[in-house]
Every structure is written in C-alpha cells, then in structure tokens.
Image: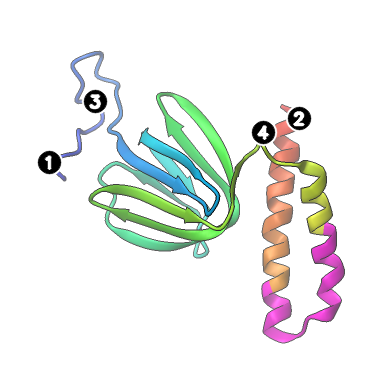
Amino acid sequence: MDPRVKPAGDSAKNGKTMATFHFDLVSPEKLAFSGEVDQVDVPGVEGDFGVLAGHAPVVATVRPGILTITAAGKRDKVIVLGGLAEMSDKGLTVLADVATTIAELDRVKFAETIKEMEEKLAEKEGSELDHAIERLDHFKSIQNELNTTAMH
C-alpha cells in the first residue's frame, strides 16, 4: 500500500476513520469541488467506478451521469455531462464538460433539453443515431434519479 495513505481503521480516535485522498472536480466555468474525500463514485463510459484512497492510477472517460462525493460521512451528488477522470499519486481529478449540483440544476431547462434531444433523433442515422440515443439514455437516467431523489 502507498505509504502516504493511512488504511481504514488505523486511527488514534476510534478506529473507524477511513483513509482520505485529494479530489478536484473542475469544469470550464469553475472549480466545483476541491478537498479531502473518503470516496468518489464516477459515472464512467466503460462502467461506473468507485475511487478510494490508494486506488491504482487510471485515466477514464466520464459519461453524463451523477458523480457522488463522500467526505466526512456526508454524500454530495453532482451532475456531470461528460469529461475525463484521472487518478494519480496526487489524487483524483475529474475534468467535467459540465458540473452542477442537484440544487443548482434548472430542472425545467433540463427536461426541455431532453425533449429537444428526442426530437432531433429523427435527423440522425447510423452510428450518429446510436451515439445520440446513448446520450439521451444517460440524460433520462439522470432525470429519473433526480425524480427519485426529490421523492425522498
């Protein structure tokens, strides 16, 4: 294990502290998050994946979805619409095309975007159509999770 990472349970307090690592979430508009975290769950193109302290170095493409940040027992969800994730010895950095918290999201505008995407499907063919359908499915998945979150 990396000597800079303190294993879970290796705490002088109560033996329950998780190992942490540095995480930066960056979008073109702003630094959306920067700090020490316990875990980050990333929506990856090749499948969603969780990152903990000591994770092996990796570079992955981020798909539209909900990224979950766990720090100090609190979970924050951020909508990301594509990008790139890199885990290195310095921590995890996600360069997102768009990153917005659920509280900041204009749900009406988001629903309108989905409707526009659906209407434009008829203009697409072949692999372009496949890509548009896949992206639309990701947006609908975000919308479904938002609706589920709003009910709780």
Query: Considering only vertical position in the picture, is 54 above or below 149?
Result: below
* Marking on residue 9: 3
Q: Can you name the residue that lies furthest to the top here?
A: 13
Query: Considering only vertical position in the picture, is 141 above or below 84?
Result: above
* Marking on residue 30: none
Residue 38 in view of the camera: no
Q: Residues within 10 Å of mark 4 (few under 14, many from 20)?
A: few
- SS for callout 4: loop
Q: Can you name the residue that lies furthest to the front here?
A: 29
User: Could you tell me the amino acid type at mark 2?
Assistant: Met
The quarter of the rendered structure image containing the C terminus is top right
- The residue lying at 30 percent from left, 34 percent from top is 20
Query: Considering only vertical position in the picture, is 22 above or below 136?
Result: above
* Nearest to N terminus: mark 4 or mark 2: 4
- SS for callout 1: loop
* Nearest to N terminus: mark 4 or mark 1: 1
Residue marked by disc 4: 103
Nearer the observer: mark 4 or 2; the answer is 4
Q: Position of residue 147 (x, y in %)?
A: 76, 39
* Marking on residue 3: 1
User: Could you tell me the amino acid type at mark 4?
Assistant: Ala
* Nearest to N terminus: mark 2 or mark 1: 1
Residue marked by disc 2: 151
- SS for callout 2: helix
- Asked if the residue under mark 2 is in contact with the one under mark 4, i.e. CB atoms within 8 Å, the reply is no
Q: Position of residue 41 (x, y in %)?
A: 47, 45
- Asked if the residue under mark 1 is in contact with the one under mark 4, i.e. CB atoms within 8 Å, the reply is no
